[in-house]
Image (cartoon, grey):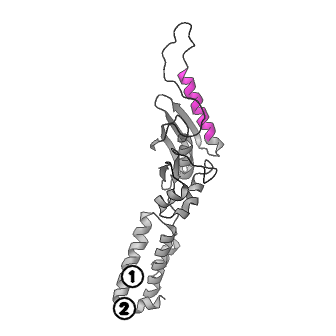
Amino acid sequence: MGIFSFIKDAGEKLFGAVSTSATAAPAGAAPAPDVAALNKTAGDAIATYIRAQGLNADNLQVSFNGASHTVTVSGQAADQATKEKMLVAAGNVQHVDKVDDQLTVLNPTPVSQFHTVVSGDNLWKIADKYYGNGAKNDVIFEANKPMLKSPDKIYPGQVLRIPALARSVSSTVECFNKNATRGSRFFMCEVRKAQLRTAGSTDGQVSQYTERPAARRAERLLASNDQYSQEAT
């Protein structure tokens, strides 16, 4: 939960600007706008847009405050990805400056990072920034569907989800298999490190429990006797 910032002048055109003036109109002039009604219309339009993306939550409530350009979204989402997509869908709308996240999650998982697109950005550059590997751009594309229809259709001011890369647990267990020879353990740890580099993992826990112990074990094995490195080849 919290407040997420967006670019007010970028995004889907779902409704017009909501006037915040409640001053009575002079005699003979057009009546002053009903601000409460306009806010409700805007909130309903955003809720309809969210559902049109195939996204929903139990007891979903969406409201809009034209004075602060803030959308408030509440309810219970099935998972973290659905919650984050709903927030992104609500925020990437013209006249929305902030999203007040009041959503809960039935099955919590680690939260994503978020990136605001600037001129010159593309998914390859964004993937290279967050994952260290531009080829992982398809992860970002999939994480922002169905709002993103094409990898090439991003625009300045748009906010994108940047989820953590998935990691393998089985290779981590293999690395510490006590039944393996010391040379084999060295080999498996080195393989695991290569896998992590290829995946461009940014998960600090993966680094803590695999790469660092693997590096320490490799140093000890090599210092102890060259035969262990020979066993691994």
Tag 2, which secondary structure? loop
Where residue 148 sits in the image (x, y, percent)? Answer: 61, 49
The residue lying at 57 percent from left, 54 percent from top is 143
Residue type at tag 1 = Ala
**Which of pointers 2 and 1 lies earlier in the amino acid sequence?**
1
- Give the magenta part as a residue range: 32-49
Tag 1, which secondary structure? helix
**Does residue 94 belong to the magenta stretch?**
no
Question: What is the magenta segment's predominant secondary structure?
Answer: helix
Across the whole image, how many numbered discs are drawn on residues? 2
The residue lying at 62 percent from left, 39 percent from top is 49
- Say left or right for 218 vs 7: left
- Residue 178 showing in the rendered view: no
Q: Is residue 18 above or below residue 23?
A: below
**Residue neighbourhood size for the residue with mark 2, other residues' Cα within 10 Å, grouped as few (<14), some (14–19), many (≥20):** few
Cα distance in 3D space between marks 2 and 1: 11 Å
Q: Which residue is mark 2?
A: 225
Residue type at tag 2 = Asn
Q: Is residue 42 above or below residue 228?
A: above
Q: Which residue is mark 1?
A: 218
Where residue 123 sits in the image (x, y, percent)? Answer: 55, 56
Q: Is residue 45 above or below residue 81?
A: above
Q: Is residue 220 above or below residue 170?
A: below
**Residue neighbourhood size for the residue with mark 1, other residues' Cα within 10 Å, grouped as few (<14), some (14–19), many (≥20):** many
The residue lying at 41 percent from left, 93 percent from top is 227
Where residue 2 sits in the image (x, y, percent)? Answer: 44, 43
Identify the residue at the far top of this view: 27
Where residue 35 sits in the image (x, y, percent)? Answer: 53, 22
